Image (tube, grey):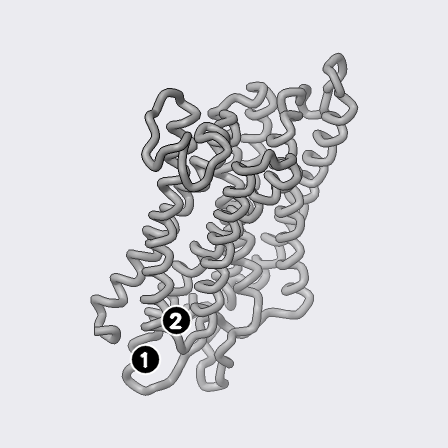
Amino acid sequence: MVKSRGFGVFVFVVCILASVQNFVVNSIGFLDAYTGSAFGCGHQWFECNGRWIPVIQSLQTFIEFSHRVGVPILTILLLVAAVSSIMRYRRWREISLFVGLSIFFVLLEAVLGGLAVVYNEPASVIATHFGVSLLAFASTALLTIYVRRAERVYGTYLASGERKPLRDAAPSRGFQWFAWLGLPLIYLAMYVGAYISSSGAGDAFRGFPFPDESGIDNFHHARLLDWTHRSIAMILVIWMVALVARTYRTRRDRPDLYRGAWFAMIFVVLQAFSGVYLVLSHVSIQAFMLHVSIVTGLFVSLCYVAIQSLPPFVPVHKGEAYPVGERSPAH
């Protein structure tokens, strides 16, 4: 059964469902933070206001309880995806890697969420929770992508016993360093943004294109955060243009890197416009949800490019070279 085509389709579908559920849980969590619903169930975990199924008397209770209900659903889907992926594709180490990362970050996210409810955590811890939630989603999304890649070469493995790599030969070491540089940049931008949201400083943001927080209580603190966030965002845009330019030169040999860079470029432009909308709307709920949703896609795109720049875990043999412009099974 494990070797059947139908089981491969099952694994891929469950991975997609786990990724979608992860995104839904994260989105409700972002809405939870924006509306101040984290304590809609009181300072209790696992119960909600003293009951397993609470009486919904407020919007905050509904949002928080919905978030809690989504977590076990995600956990079940992820465990099914993890077990089935390992059963079918355990000979490709990328699958085991993303299974482990997905489970680790989802569990860590749940623990941080529980601690944030039981204890009144500071903004720095809540910002860390936000970053972990994006790492959890990125790991699940990459597991889905690599399950699809493994399925493309699984038939060859059954026919000949040969394990083909899931990525092509690595680009230059300089490009690898450059590709991975984007992850600390985007993570820092996300952390500062999440800290701004958690501390309530976002309400003080004024002015475009330059910050203008004058006339507001504690505006010096808000202005510093505003300048920091916008500066990191500008550096990220410049870095993204350079990434697209570098992948353009190797687009025939590595179209996967070029596509990933363009996806990231589109997301970073959308992120910039949503940031403008966020400031001009004085952090409206629509602008906030749009902003955090786009950054999720941006983060996954950058993780994809970084992972794709690494050498394949299964070595590329000389006999597996592909003519320039021809797509290999790994693409």
Which residue does the numbered mark 1 point to in the structure image? 156
Q: Nearer the viewer, residue 152 or 33?
A: 33
Question: Where residue 52 sits in the image (x, y, percent)?
Answer: 34, 37
Residue that label 2 marks: 329
Residue for point 52% across, 60% down? 257
Q: Amino acid at mark 2?
A: Pro
Q: Residue furthest front?
A: 50
Residue 292 position within the rendered picture, expressed as x and y whole percent measured from the top left: 52, 36
Picture coordinates of residue 19, whole percent (x, y): 39, 51
Specify the quadrant of the image occupied by residue 2.
Answer: bottom left
Mark 1 / mark 2, whichever is N-terminal:
1
The alpha-carbon separation of the residues under discs 1 and 2 comes to 10 Å
Location of the N terminus by quadrant is: bottom left
The tag on residue 177 is none
> Residue 127: x, y in percent?
61, 40
The quarter of the displayed image where residue 87 is located? bottom left
Q: Is residue 202 left or right of residue 328?
A: right
Q: In the picture provided, is 199 more to the left or to the right than 150?
A: right
Q: Quadrant of the C terminus?
A: bottom left
Q: Residues within 10 Å of mark 1 (few under 14, many from 20)?
A: few
Mark 2 crowdedness (10 Å alpha carbons): few <14, some 14-19, many ≥20: some
| Residue 226 visible in the displayed image | yes
Foreground label between 1 and 2: 1
> What number of labels is visible?
2
- Residue beneath the point at 47% across and 25% down: 286
Circle 1 SS class: helix
Q: Nearer the viewer, residue 37 or 190?
A: 37
In the image, residue 112 sits, relative to residue 216, either above or below, namely below
Residues at marks 1 and 2 touching, judged by CB atoms closer than 8 Å: yes
| Residue at (60% x, 69% y) in the render | 171
Residue 226 relative to residue 183: left or right: right
Q: Which one is in front, 138 or 179?
A: 138
